[in-house]
Amino acid sequence: MNTTQRYFYKKEDKLKSRKAIEELFAKGKSFSNFPLKVIWVPHNPMAVLQAGVGVSSRNFKKAVDRNRIKRLMREAYRLQKNMLNESLEKKQQKMSVFFLYLGKELPEYDLIYEKMGNSIKRLIKLSDENAERNT
């Protein structure tokens, strides 16, 4: 039997609700890991982990460029989110997170992958601290 892990980014894992996104930006905590800015809120009633990505049209005028960066960010997240998901399930926590790209030039995939991994590790650490505070 094949025991390789499969990676998904399903519809229920995506942060789509305008209301949820507005709440995230209003009440969420944030940190930067240049060129990414991560905004997160510990409680999410919808799913264990929901995520969204965004790129400023101020820095990238062409939609083609913005869409490419968002595709790279979603792929890097999809491949690395299992660490965060398992950590949250183990602690019975839920989280909404939003990744913003702040850079001014088109990134390489390797840079996005590395920064996304670092951001996810930091989110795990922050969720651990949040769990300790709440108990």
Image (cartoon, rainbow, N blue to C red):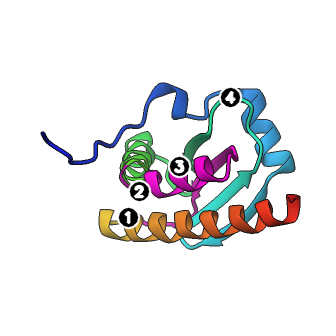
Question: Marks 3 and 4, Cα distance to the nearest angstrom?
Answer: 14 Å
Q: Which residue is mark 4?
A: 46
Callout 1–callout 3 Cβ contact below 8 Å: no
Callout 1–callout 2 Cβ contact below 8 Å: yes
Q: Is residue 58 visible?
A: no
Which label is found at residue 16?
Answer: none
Question: Marks 1 and 4, Cα distance to the nearest angstrom?
Answer: 26 Å
Q: Which residue is mark 2?
A: 80
Whichever of callouts 1 and 2 sits on the residue coming sooner in the sequence is 2
Q: Would residue 8 appear left or right of 86 to someone viewing this image?
A: left
Residue at 57% from the left image edge and 43% from the top image edge: 51
Residue at 74% from the left image edge and 62% from the top image edge: 30
Q: Residues within 10 Å of mark 3 (few under 14, many from 20)?
A: some
The local secondary structure at tag 2 comes to helix
Q: Which residue is mark 3?
A: 85
Whichever of callouts 1 and 3 sits on the residue coming sooner in the sequence is 3
Q: Residues within 10 Å of mark 2 (few under 14, many from 20)?
A: some
Q: Mark 2 is on which residue type?
A: Gln
Establish if 102 lies above or below 25: below
Magenta highlight range: 79-107
Residue 106 in the image: state x and y as whole percent. Answer: 39, 62
Residue 9 in the image: state x and y as whole percent. Answer: 42, 37
Question: Marks 4 and 2, Cα distance to the nearest angstrom?
Answer: 21 Å
Q: Mark 1 is on which residue type?
A: Tyr
Callout 1–callout 4 Cβ contact below 8 Å: no
Q: Which residue is mark 1?
A: 113
The local secondary structure at tag 3 comes to helix
Residue 32 lies in quadrant = bottom right
